[in-house]
Image (cartoon, rainbow, N blue to C red):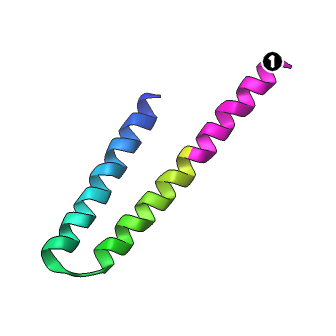
Amino acid sequence: MLFLRIVGILAAIAIGAGIISFLFTGDRRYLGLSWRIAKYALIFALVLFALLALERLMVIF
C-alpha cells in the first residue's frame, strides 16, 4: 500500500505540474501529458484494485 501512495502522490504532482505549466506557457502539450498521466494512473489503480478483489474472492472460496 505504501507503493500505491507513492505512485499516487507522484502522479498528482506530475498532473499538477502539467496543468500549471499549461497555465504559464499556453502550450497544450502539457495538458495532453497531464491527461495521459491521469489516464494511466487510473488504469493502474483499477487493475490493482481488481487484483485485490480477486485475491479476496480466492481467500473466501
Number of numbered discs:
1
- Disc 1 secondary structure class: helix
In the depicted structure, whether residue 53 falls above or below residue 50: above
Amino acid type shown at disc 1? Ile
- Looking at the picture, how far across and down is residue 7, in whole percent? 40, 43
In the depicted structure, whether residue 53 falls above or below residue 26: above
User: On the image, numbered disc 1 is attached to which residue?
Assistant: 60
Q: Give the residue displayed 22% in from the left and 73% down from the top.
A: 22
Classified by dominant secondary structure, the portion drawn in magenta counts as: helix
In the depicted structure, whether residue 48 falls above or below residue 19: above
Residue at the front extreme, as displayed:
23
* Corner quadrant of residue 18: bottom left
Q: Give the residue displayed 36% in from the left and 51% down from the top.
A: 11
- The question of residue 25 being in magenta is answered with no
- Looking at the picture, how far across and down is residue 2, in whole percent? 41, 29
Q: Give the residue displayed 36% in from the left and 38% down from the top.
A: 6
Magenta segment boundaries in residue numbering: 46-61
Residue at the left extreme, as displayed:
24
* Corner quadrant of residue 19: bottom left
Residue at the right extreme, as displayed:
61
- The question of residue 58 being in magenta is answered with yes
For the C terminus, give its image quadrant.
top right
In the depicted structure, whether residue 55 falls above or below residue 51: above
- Looking at the picture, how far across and down is residue 28, in whole percent? 29, 80
- Is 36 on the left or on the right of 48, as rendered? left
Front-most of 24 and 44? 24
- Is 17 on the left or on the right of 55, as rendered? left
- Looking at the picture, how far across and down is residue 5, in whole percent? 39, 35
Q: Give the residue displayed 24% in from the left and 81% down from the top.
A: 27
* Corner quadrant of residue 26: bottom left
Q: Dot 1 surroundings within 10 Å: few (below 14), some, or many (20 or more)? A: few
